[in-house]
Image (cartoon, coloured by chain):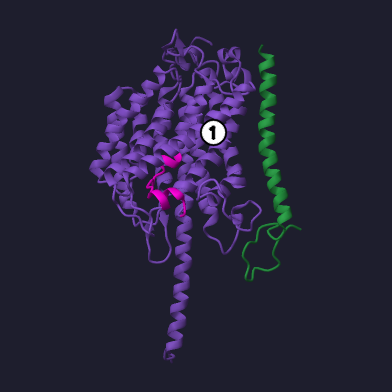
Amino acid sequence: MATETPTLESLQASLDAQQAIFNMHQAMNVEVFYWWCTAIMVMIHAGFLAYEMGASRSKNALAAGVKNILALAVIIPTFYLFGWWIYNAFPGGLMPVEASSALPWSQSMGPDVQDMGTGIFWAAFALFGATTGSIMSGAVIERIRVSAFLILTVILGSGVWILAGAWGWHPDGWMLTEMGYHDVGASGVVHAIAGFFTLGVLINLGPRVGKFINGVPQQIRAHNLPMTLIGLMMIIFGFFGFLGGCIIFNGGDTGWTTIYNNPTNLSAFAFNTLMGFAGGVIGCYIATRDPFWTMSGGLVGIISIAAGLDLYDPGLAFIIATCVSFIAVGAAKLLEKKGIDDAVGAVAVHGVTGVVAVILVGVFAGGTPNVGGNPAISLYGQTVCAIVMAVLGFVPGYAVSYLLKKFNMLRVPENVEVLGLDEVEILAHPYPETVPAKSGTTTNVGDLEAKGA
Amino acid sequence: MGTSITSWENVSAYFTFADNPLALMLFSLGVAGIVVGLIRFIMKHEAEAFDNHK
């Protein structure tokens, strides 16, 4: 069989064809990576759903769940309408720059054969936004109006956090270009923002009926603590999607980078995510020996090291996570002492831990250079930006909830709270009548059926 | 009627009404309307439910 002698031109054509195939597969790999990160992030919301329903008393279990599901359903379309535009338009501060391609009537915001990035990044960021809404959701259970909660969650999940993202995560964000800000795992832009927004809301919302008697805090027991613990573990699982979504999968020969374009890889994230988780669990267990806090410690641990996830020695990450757990527990106790009823400790776990995490990057990784001519990481820059995050979260949360309170739109009436939100609003019951929902009752269904119930 | 392409040759954005910004703005208004409508609907439901349990 005769074969043609390859020419320089035919070899070049073959090489070009191979290169085109390689480029297409690499672009598809990028899509696949973020697709699965987004899918795994949905587990965060499944976890928050279980955790909130379990943390409620049985009379409010379904109301807590419905509120959480609706949060996801309103943040996704509003993030499509204006959240993605905010990220692209406000990296410089409060004056927008041209970002019309991120508006919902742009050709970029829909199926496009030539664009294998916008949709997948939009989806990941929308789920980050939904996470902020879920963080607030647990803290305000059992007394907030669903309508008020949805207004607040849209402002937080499609507005405030993504403005922080534009400042602290965008390659042109002023926090990076002027302060050398480093927060690869979103301790500040997601967790601190959500935690302090929640604090602003809680101040206006007030505590649940019976939480404080003569100023003394009472324990309101979760009706299903095991479900709460499983929910928290599901959130931890979802964090692997969340943190995966925080790394940049580049085309070409660049490989992985942080959102700030500094070199990193998933191995760095793997070391410190797991060490942070373990340290947080241990710290919170020692600090409280409480099952809820022990499991919440996993969150505290990961959030405490997420800002410097790419830079820490794993041993240091473990120690940081353990120590910050004591700060988080202390902050939760202090807030309760001050009359703040945070049903799930969201302000301490996310807000306080997030702020501390951002500052600690300045303490332990100060002097680390940034690329692209941006200033190096510094304790000063990290501290200023941490304060900005706390204020940026708190002010709108407080202001909007204050207005809602003034118009009597924030909280359910007291008699409704006493009756239970499921009975009044949901028109459904979380458990069949044969399963007594009363706390401490141990009768099982089989016993009741045997008695003819 | 809403397709924005007539051929897959050299196609980029190919979703329905991609070549009609006015239609896309109207859809965006529709999305916003549904979200606002949901919140209004819940407010009404809450008011009725709370009234029924006074």
State the quadrant of the C terminus of chain A. Answer: top right
State the quadrant of the N terminus of chain A. Answer: bottom left
> Does residue A105 sit above or below A354 in this rendering?
below
Q: Is residue A70 left or right of residue A251?
A: right
Residue of label 1: A396
> Does residue B5 sit above or below A339 in this rendering?
below
Q: Which residue is at a point 50% across and 28% down the rendered structure image?
A: A200
The residue marked by circle 1 belongs to what chain?
A: A
**Residue A191 seen in the figure:** no
Q: Is residue A204 left or right of residue A371?
A: right
Front residue (pair A60, A157): A157
Give the percent coordinates (x, y) of residue A333. 36, 21
Q: Which residue is at a point 70% across and 25% down the rendered structure image?
A: B44
Give the percent coordinates (x, y) of residue A171. 45, 54
Give the percent coordinates (x, y) of residue A30. 45, 58
Q: Write down the region rendered in magenta.
A: A172-191
Q: What chain is the purple one?
A: A
Label 1 crowd (10 A; few <14 / some 14-19 / many >=20): many
Front residue (pair A11, B23): B23
Residue A181 in the magenta stretch? The answer is: yes
**Residue A379 seen in the figure:** yes
Q: Is residue A200 left or right of residue B17?
A: left
Q: Which residue is at a point 48% across and 26% down the rendered structure image?
A: A139
The three-letter code of the residue at mark 1 reads Pro
Give the percent coordinates (x, y) of residue A319. 25, 37
SS category of the residue bearing label 1: helix
Which image quadrant for residue A350? top left
Residue A56 in the magenta stretch? The answer is: no
Front residue (pair A248, A453): A248
Front residue (pair A296, A191): A191
Q: Which residue is at a point 47% across and 82% down the rendered structure image?
A: A13
Q: What chain is the green one?
A: B
